[in-house]
Image (cartoon, rainbow, N blue to C red):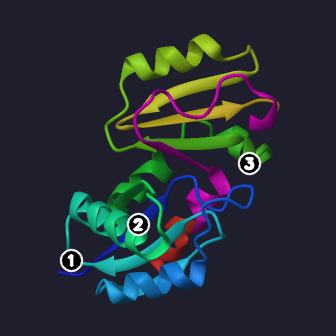
Amino acid sequence: MVKQFVALLRGINVGGHRKVPMAALRDLAGELGLEAPRTYVASGNLVFAGHDANTALESRFETAIEERFGFRVDVIVRSKAEWTAYRKSNPFVAESEETANFVMLCIGKQPATDAHVEALRARASEKEKVERRGDAIWIWFGEGAGRSKIGSVPGKSVWTSRNWRTVVAIDEMMSD
């Protein structure tokens, strides 16, 4: 059965480093046998249809990207059902309506824990909030992420973040 997925590439196209053109990423997905690859902005969001499990897709992408571009990129894959559940779990609905770019979804290759949340809260200012919902962490940066001391990842393992606008856009792309 074909399912919709999103692949989130971590740390590409930042400051002119680790460049992965989105057209090349879509081509690579097609070469891997994935269907209808589409990208959202140049920060590594790829929506596609496929048959494999998330971890198998992550591994295939990581290997193919390293072979094609010459550097390793961590990839996190989530299904449409998982992504929609993230969207519905946003604990900062009011903040998302006011300052959508200040609300971030943080997901990792491993599930978020209460210890991850406490580590982030320890660095948070009084104008920041951190909540865990299932395997994800939500952060509201009250004055914007650029001014924050909290960071956007809870540990040394593989994590990536997307702002609320991107969360919504990806969910809508998978619904088309």
Left or right of 150: which side holds 134? Answer: left
Identified by mark 3, the residue type is: Asn
Tell me the number on the disc at residue 66.
2
Label 1 is placed on what type of residue?
A: His
Instruction: Tell me the mark number nearer the camera, choosing from 3 and 1.
Output: 1
Q: CA distance from mark 2 to mark 1?
A: 22 Å
Q: CA distance from mark 3 to mark 1?
A: 32 Å
Mark 3 element type: helix
| Residue 87 placement (x, y as % from top left) | 50, 52
Above or below, comparing residue 46 to residue 99 in the picture: below
Q: Which mark is residue 107?
A: none
Point 43% across, 22% down: residue: 116
Contact flag, marks 2 and 3 (Cβ < 8 Å): no
The dot on residue 51 is 1
Q: Is residue 164 magenta?
A: yes
Residue pictured at 42% horizontal, 83% vertical: 28
Q: Do the CB atoms of the residues marked 3 and 1 lie less than 8 Å apart?
A: no
Q: Secondary structure at mark 2?
A: helix
The quarter of the picture where residue 124 lies is top right
Mark 3 highlights which residue? Answer: 101
Q: Residue at x 40, y 16 (%)?
A: 115
152 within the magenta span: yes
Choose between 129 and 26: the one closer to the eye.
26
Query: Residue 144: in sight, yes or no?
Result: no
Instruction: Where is residue 42? Give x, y as percent.
Output: 65, 69
Badge 2 crowding class, 10 Å Cα cut-off, few under 14, some 14 to 19, many 20 or more, is few
The span shown in magenta is 145-169
- State the SS at label 1: loop
Locate residue 113, reporting x and y percent: 36, 25
Is residue 147 or residue 130 the one in the foreground?
147
Instruction: Please name the amino acid that badge 2 sits on.
Output: Glu
**Which quadrant holds residue 141?**
top right
